[in-house]
Image (cartoon, grey):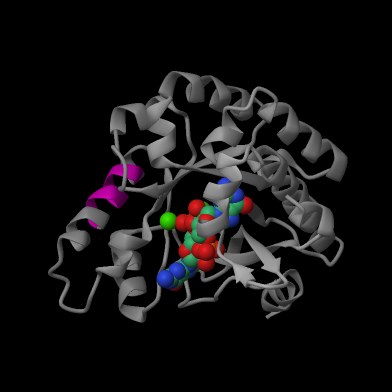
């Protein structure tokens, strides 16, 4: 409850390069809680607690504001044409004021809506489909981009995906992890099929958790657009990310 007030929440930034050009075209903001006693606590641990204590809207709002602010700070260093992705949790998305919070964050920081991507996990987006559709439509009107996170772990309803008017999907790390040199796992077939389907639907595809050259070359061969993972870089603080861009 004090983390926000004490200023011990930070964002780390993981680059998302385009596979063919190897240019960093996007970045994902990942939340960190630097607890004096516990060290850096994983969002996988504290986000569920924040949700259960009704703190997610407040924390999530801070994340959106901070990501927009950081993007404009980088712009003052000459960074342009960079997309920034922010994770949005279920309860945050369906909070009545959510669209206004996004709109105000953009207005206050002056960030172009087209530079902001909101990532919503697949299981969430398919559960409250009708409600989510309406929220997505409003965000779409504002020209904010939408991404389905952890794709392949939920229902993967292709019909619904079409009606949700999303811009990109992110293939879950668990599938990428299974891609090996022999190329014989089911995941190889699944990733290939997801990329093929996404192309036909004119959706951009990001592969999460890319750690090896083999995984990258496979993704390149099947036409996946973007790769995110330790192979390129771990999540970095804002200053280190700027240095990486400079290279
Ligand atoms: P995610 O959205 O799937 O984010 C990717 C996670 O994979 C990040 O973990 C990232 O550090 C990690 N990762 C990236 N590349 C690799 C790789 O090559 N190998 C492996 N093994 N892992 C990799 P992180 O930062 O611990 O975040 C965990 C999850 O917490 C995120 O999963 C996301 O669902 C959630 N999260 C993070 N920040 C926020 C936030 O601001 N709001 C909300 N609601 N959730 C957040
Ligand atoms: Ca994500
Ligand atoms: Ca994931």
Judging depth in this view, the residue of 108 and 91 nearest the camera is 91
Q: Where is residue 137 in the image (x, y as percent from the top left)?
A: 56, 23
Asked whether residue 238 is in view, the answer is: yes
Residue at 65 percent across and 53 percent down: it is 84
Q: On screen, 136 above or below 50?
A: above
Residue at 55 percent across and 75 percent down: it is 234
Image quadrant of residue 101?
top right
The residue positioned farthest toward the front in the image shown: 37
Tell me if 10 is positioned left or right of 134 in this view: right
Asked whether residue 86 is in view, the answer is: no
Image quadrant of residue 207?
bottom left
The residue positioned farthest toward the left in the image shown: 184
Q: On screen, 222 above or below 238?
A: above
How many numbered marks appear? Answer: 0
Q: Where is residue 171 in the image (x, y as percent from the top left)?
A: 37, 54
Q: On screen, 187 above or below 131?
A: below
Q: On screen, 119 above or below 178?
A: above
Tell me if 224 is positioned left or right of 247 in this view: left
Residue at 87 percent across and 62 percent down: it is 76
Q: Main secondary structure of the magenta part?
A: helix
Q: Which image quarter is the C terminus in?
A: bottom right
Residue stretch rendered in magenta on the structure: 192-198
Magenta stretch containing residue 201, yes or no? no
Judging depth in this view, the residue of 183 and 151 nearest the camera is 151
Q: Position of residue 146 (x, y in %)?
A: 54, 39
């Amino acid at each position: 409850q004090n983390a926000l007030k004490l200023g011990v929440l930070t964002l780390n930034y993981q680059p998302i390069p385009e596979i063919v050009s190897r240019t960093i075209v996007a970045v994902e903001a990942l939340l960190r809680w630097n607890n004096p006693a516990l060290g850096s606590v994983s969002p996988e641990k504290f986000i569920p607690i924040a949700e259960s204590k009704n703190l997610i809207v407040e924390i999530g709002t801070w994340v959106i504001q901070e990501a927009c602010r950081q993007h404009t700070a980088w712009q003052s260093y000459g960074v342009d044409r960079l997309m920034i992705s922010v994770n949005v949790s279920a309860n945050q998305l369906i909070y009545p004021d959510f669209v206004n919070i996004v709109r105000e964050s953009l207005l206050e920081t002056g960030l172009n809506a087209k530079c902001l991507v909101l990532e919503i996990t697949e299981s969430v987006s398919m559960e409250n489909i009708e409600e989510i559709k309406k929220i997505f439509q409003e965000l779409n009107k504002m020209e904010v981009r939408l991404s389905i996170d952890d794709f392949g772990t939920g229902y993967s309803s292709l019909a619904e995906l079409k009606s949700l008017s999303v811009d990109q999907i992110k293939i879950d790390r668990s599938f990428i992890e299974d891609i090996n040199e022999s190329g014989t796992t089911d995941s190889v077939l699944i990733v290939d099929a997801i990329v093929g389907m996404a192309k036909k639907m004119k959706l951009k595809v990001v592969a999460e958790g890319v750690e090896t050259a083999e995984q990258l070359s496979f993704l390149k061969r099947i036409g996946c657009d973007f790769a995110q993972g330790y192979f390129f870089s771990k999540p970095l603080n804002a200053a280190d990310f700027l240095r990486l861009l400079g290279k």
